[in-house]
Image (cartoon, helix red, strand yellow):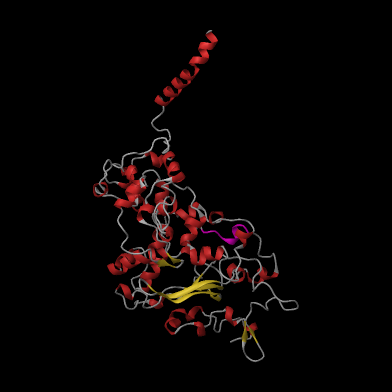
Amino acid sequence: MKRKNLFTLLPFLILFIVIVACAEKKEDDPISPELTPVKSVASCEGCHTSYETLKKVYTPDTEGGGSGCGGDIPVIEPYDRVYLAGTGYKEFKKDVHGKMPCVACHNGVDGTSDKKIAHSKDFIKKPSAYSELKCAGCHTDIYLRTKNSIHEQGWGQKSMVTLRSGLGNIPNAFNLLTQKMKDGYEKNCAKCHASCGDCHVNRPKAGGGGLYRGHEFIKTPDMREHCTTCHTSRGGHAFFGQAAGTKPDVHLEKRGFTCMSCHSKNEIHGDGKIYDQRYKMELLPECTDCHSNIAKSNNYHTEHIKDLSCHTCHSQDYNNCGSCHVGGEGARIPSYLGYKIGMNPIPETKPFRMALLRRSLMAPDSWKEYGTPILANFNIRPTFKYTTPHNIQKWTKRTQVASGKLCFDACHAIKNEDGTIRNKELYLFKSDLQSWEITATQGITVDGKFPASWGIK
């Protein structure tokens, strides 16, 4: 009889245990949105977890997504950019950031269904744009390293604008630009320069912006959704082998590398220093980090390891474009697959005599749409730059020669009997330049700079 009573009471005992356990649940335990849905829209989360409410109160964009080096920027509706839902939102609620009140990072007013009131009191749309106030308190070391990083500040790009404008080098010279030019830079050039949130919470601007995955904080950015969304034209496009006649980079194809396989988080975050050109960054990866002892691994390396950058031999054809009207008609030299070897334009940073080059965007009148008809000191830098496309192959058109041919047959400039030059298309000659770029660039052309043994003046 007692045993029977015990089994009769068992369901009630279990229920009692569950009630007690819930009552003793710690306040900082993870919250599941499915178990504790936000019912009232009179709150930050209440509004942003209600798709119907967001569609009723959203403010339409006043202009389209725009375009960049990677093509047209996707248009994502404003309500989709701020909607909290899905597995990402669940993960956010488990994270320490999800346990903080929304107003701790975004300011504004909680506990109201009035959008205007909610977005008052110095509301901040993107807290990481104010990282000193909103991120540094918890992530002090990262903030101190990142605040001057190339990723966040785009110093190399800014340096090129200020130098060609005749104002000197960054950082102070950028503030001397006209307000129109600074506005133009922010609207056009800054699309791919990111604060913390652009890599760890949002989609990059170039990918349409907005929350990437329901406000989840992503520790390691996704290679396709973050890295190559910005690094598209000469990054992802080359790495994935998307151009006709090209192959994926051997590091992806053979080893499955991601961006972070070579680029460390310390490099990405920066070291706190300001670099006016990205190749000066001291934490950049080098081919020799993995490929050690290659100087004597074959005759090609023995002969050229000190004179040619690795990409000179091991890159495929890659994207070039140029002569851009910022905020206007865009690149007047449309994107094309090309390959040019020239004199190293940054010998103070890279030790090679010759290097692979790419055509740059800027022209003397690039900023005319923003009140600067002609850049005052345009010729201070060449229009072709040192480049390192992510499209490496062991065997390329230059490292393979036909049977019976000499080892340099596919890469040296060779004078034919009729006076023409074989392999001339590989090299940057003065004759390849447009009239407006000759003064700026002829110093890195190969005219008159080939070894005497090649017999080409």
Identify which residue, 204 or 351, lies in the foreground: 204
Count of residue discs: 0
Residue 404 rendering spot, x and y as whole percentages = 75, 78
The outermost residue toward the bottom is 418
Residue 285 in magenta?
Answer: yes
Q: Is residue 163 left or right of residue 5?
A: left
Residue 385 in sight:
yes
Farthest residue to the top: give it. 1
Image height check: is 52 above or below 163? above
The C terminus sits in image quarter:
bottom right
- Residue located 50% across and 83% down the image: 430
User: Which residue is located at x 33 percent, y 71 percent?
Assistant: 167
Front residue of 173/151: it is: 151
Q: Position of residue 185 (x, y in %)?
A: 35, 66
Locate residue 68: give its quadrant: bottom left
What residue do we see at 69% from left, 65% from top? 296
Q: Looking at the image, which is closer to me, 161 or 249?
A: 249
Q: Is residue 303 magenta?
A: no
324 versus 287 height, above or below: below
* Any part of residue 291 in sight: no
Percent position of residue 353, x then y? 56, 73
Relative horizontal placement of residue 133, taking residue 8 as reference (left or right): left
Tell me if residue 359 comes above or below residue 44 in the rendering.
below
Residue furthest to the right: 404
Using the image, determine if residue 389 lies above or below residue 92: below
- The span shown in magenta is 284-290
Nearest the eye: 159 or 338: 338
Q: Position of residue 195 (x, y in %)?
A: 39, 55
Q: Quadrant of residue 332?
A: bottom left
